[in-house]
Image: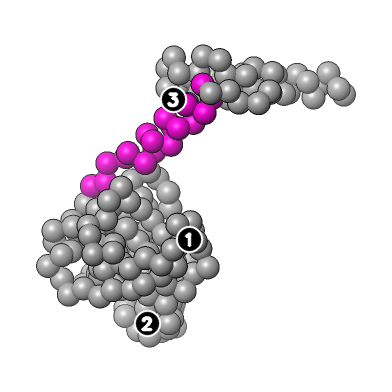
Amino acid sequence: MRSTIASFAMIFSVTIAAAAHSQSPGANQGLPMNGGPPGPDTTRVQEQMSAARAAQPAGPLRIIFGDKSAEWTAATLAALPHASITVYNEHAKANQTYSGVALIDLLAKMGVPEKPRGKELKLYIVAEGSDGYQVVYSIGEVTPDVHDGTVMVADGQDGKPIGNDGPLKLVATGEKRPARWVRNLVAVRVLTAQ
């Protein structure tokens, strides 16, 4: 049993080292192969991988509902009436003020019901960032007819354009932590639960 665990630990360490090598060739020199504490090279590889994920270029926001689709950029969004929300960001440990357009306003332009009833409440939204991060909201969570919170496509933060998290970012009020906020927002799909 002990040798099986030791073998598994060795395979796991080799797999992690190989994965780090494939993400950043040559940067994994000095990675611990025995499950020991990470060294400075391991930290550097982790920082490089985080920077690569954060540096994903964000294109326009594409919204899809059935056979309809629309694209929004920071410039086209800026032409619409804006609102502001102030939320506490648990990660930053600070209040932040975002400006932008309520998601339901963009969805309504494509025929998504602003006051969903009956079977329309089976609609849900999948929002995705340029790094592949995805979150889900029900239609009821994004419309003020059902929910007190606001889900916003933001193009400004604290009076400035959104920096590394933009150009567009999905933010929401009424959440204890920003787990469903999506930086570098590139896609919103409206689907129906079966």
Secondary structure of the magenta portion, mostly? helix
Classed neighbour count for the residue bearing mark 2: other residues with Cα under 10 Å, few (<14), some (14–19), many (≥20): some
Res 107 → quadrant: bottom left
Between marks 1 and 2, how big is the CA–CA gap?
27 Å
- Could you say which is closer to the camera, residue 187 or residue 80? 80
Residue in the picture at 25% in, 75% down: 83
Tell me, for residue 23, which label it has, or none. Answer: 3
Residue underneath mark 1: 93
Badge 3 amino acid: Gln
For label 1, the SS is loop
Q: Nearer the viewer, residue 83 or 89?
A: 89
At horizontal 13% and vertical 58% (from top left) the residue drawn is 75
**Eyeballing the image, is 131 above or below 162?**
above
Q: Earlier along the polypeptide chain: callout 3 or callout 2?
A: 3
- The quarter of the displayed image where residue 132 is located: top left
Tell whether label 2 touches label 1 (CB within 8 Å).
Answer: no
Please say whether residue 81 is one of the residues in the magenta stretch.
no
Q: Is residue 19 visible?
A: no
Q: Which residue position holds label 2?
A: 144
User: CA–CA distance between discs 3 and 1?
Assistant: 31 Å
Q: Nearer the viewer, mark 1 or mark 2?
A: 1
- Rate crowding at label 1 as few (under 14), some (14 to 19) or many (20 or more) other CA atoms within 10 Å: few
Q: Is residue 77 left or right of residue 36?
A: left
Q: Position of residue 180 (x, y in %)?
A: 45, 60
Magenta residue span: 41-59
**Mark 2 residue element:** loop
